[in-house]
Image (cartoon, rainbow, N blue to C red):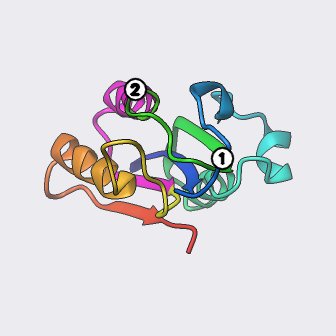
């Protein structure tokens, strides 16, 4: 039975937004999600990945997932704290046979213009070249 890690970080950053995005602006998914949390779709994308991976018969490892409403890019410190938690949850889950990430695609942070690319690169370095990494983005 393959082990599939599911996690993510979801935030649409708008450079023109006056709304700050501190760490407290992010909602953190409980781990593990209850069946009603998953069924309600409360955790957009993340819940869908969890359900799909379970339906495939995989052993699902629910990793760190946080989301914030559209607002200004977060600080480098906030982004690093969130990324560290995602990476730590993957380290704890290792070894895995596949990784599914729900990211935004338009997330930026101070000093990081491509959060999705940064996260994917970091995870690729962790899991190696032969573990598939799937990324869904909010286009």
Residue 111 visible, this orientation: yes
Q: Is residue 99 magenta?
A: yes
Q: Nearer the viewer, residue 25 or 48?
A: 25
Does 22 sit above or below residue 50? Answer: above
Q: Main secondary structure of the magenta part?
A: helix
At horizontal 39% and vertical 50% (from top left) the residue drawn is: 2
Callout 1 environment at 10 Å: few (<14), some (14 to 19), or many (20+)? Answer: few
What percent of the width, then of the height, locates residue 107? 48, 55
Q: Quadrant of the C terminus?
A: bottom right
Name the front one of labels 1 and 2: 1
Q: Which of 49 and 105 is in front in this view?
A: 105
Query: Does 36 sit left or right of 11 as displayed?
Result: right
What percent of the width, then of the height, locates residue 108? 43, 52
Q: Earlier in the sequence, mark 1 or mark 2?
A: 1
Query: Tag 1's secondary structure?
Result: loop
Does 134 sit above or below residue 4? Answer: below
What percent of the width, then of the height, locates residue 31? 63, 28
Name the residue that disc number 2 marks.
Answer: 77
When asked about the image quadrant of residue 12, the answer is bottom right
What percent of the width, then of the height, locates residue 97? 31, 50
Query: Does 66 sit left or right of 93 as displayed?
Result: right
At horizontal 46% and vertical 29% (from top left) the residue drawn is: 78
Q: Does the magenta stretch include residue 84?
A: yes
Name the residue that disc number 1 marks.
Answer: 18
Does 113 sit above or below residue 30? Answer: below
Magenta residues, as a range?
Answer: 80-102
Query: Does 66 sit left or right of 39 as displayed?
Result: left
In three-dimensional space, the C-alpha distance between marks 1 and 2, rounded to whole angstroms, equals 19 Å
Callout 2 environment at 10 Å: few (<14), some (14 to 19), or many (20+)? Answer: some
Q: Which of 29 and 138 is in front in this view?
A: 138
At horizontal 58% and vertical 58% (from top left) the residue drawn is: 16
């Amino acid at each position: 039975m393959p082990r599939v890690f599911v996690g993510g970080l979801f935030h649409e950053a708008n450079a023109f937004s006056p709304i700050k995005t501190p760490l407290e602006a992010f909602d953190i998914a409980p781990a593990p999600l209850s069946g009603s949390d998953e069924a309600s779709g409360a955790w957009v994308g993340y819940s869908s990945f969890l359900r799909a991976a379970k339906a495939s018969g995989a052993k699902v490892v629910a990793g760190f997932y946080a989301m914030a409403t559209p607002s200004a890019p977060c600080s480098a410190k906030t982004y690093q704290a969130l990324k560290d938690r995602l990476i730590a949850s993957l380290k704890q889950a290792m070894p895995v046979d596949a990784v599914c990430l729900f990211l935004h695609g338009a997330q930026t942070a101070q000093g990081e213009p491509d959060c999705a690319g940064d996260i994917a690169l970091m995870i690729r370095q962790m899991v190696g070249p032969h573990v598939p990494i799937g990324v869904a983005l909010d286009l």
